[in-house]
Image (tube, rainbow, N blue to C red):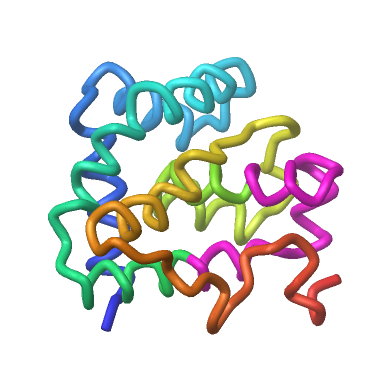
Amino acid sequence: MMTAEKFWPIIDATWSKVPSLDIIRAITIKTNDQELLPELSNAMEVQILPHYKEALSKLDKTTLTNYILFQEKKLYQLDRQEIHQYTDGSDDGFLYSRCFILGMGEAYYNMIDKNPKKATMDLEAEGFGFAAYEVYEEKFGQAFNRNSVHSIESCSNEEKW
């Protein structure tokens, strides 16, 4: 079973592979600096994503399956109108914004989860949100059965809309 204690360190470790960005991320988590966030959004897709996929590729099938299910749960938990109003308006845009929030790691995720007003418009990380699915398919030769427990699609968390 995947737990927060196993899930979040995988994301944090990928940031540590690019120390200069990890420092900017740490500052941004403390300050929620609106000028630094777009830089991190771009860097997540270009510089962090390869390290993230490499880390995921080291997981066995059961662990990667549990990782994906945990990720889907975390994205589902962010699927709330109170967060949506501070991020992007479209369904896909809101999903990609939630992927960014998740990809920033546990401290940033918890900050936005507790205080949605700290979320920022137009920050996205589509590739980060779908990397685990891609790794699963590449490694095991089959598509992962997405949304089997929690749907990551925007507006699927009906009680929060």
Left or right of 144, for residue 91: right
Which one is in front, 138 or 125? 138
Magenta span contains residue 12? no
Q: Name the image quarter holding residue 34.
A: top right
Up-down: is 89 above or below 77? above
**Residue name at image x 20 percent, y 42 percent:** 54
Q: Which residues are magenta?
A: 72-97
Q: Position of residue 92 (x, y in %)?
A: 74, 47
**Residue name at image x 25 percent, y 64 percent:** 140
Which one is in front, 157 or 23? 157
Up-down: is 132 above or below 121? below
Which one is in front, 151 or 98? 151
Left or right of 37, for residue 123: right
**Residue name at image x 47 percent, y 29 percent:** 28
Up-down: is 42 above or below 90? above
Q: Main secondary structure of the magenta part?
A: helix
Up-down: is 15 above or below 58? above
**Residue name at image x 76 percent, y 64 percent:** 80
Magenta span contains residue 73? yes
Q: Quadrant of the C terminus?
A: bottom right
Left or right of 88, for residue 32: left
Which one is in front, 70 or 142? 142
Q: Position of residue 1 (x, y in %)?
A: 26, 84
Q: Position of residue 37 (x, y in %)?
A: 56, 25
Q: Position of residue 43 (x, y in %)?
A: 43, 22
Left or right of 109, for residue 133: left
Instruction: Count how many numbered circles sit on residues in the image.
Output: 0
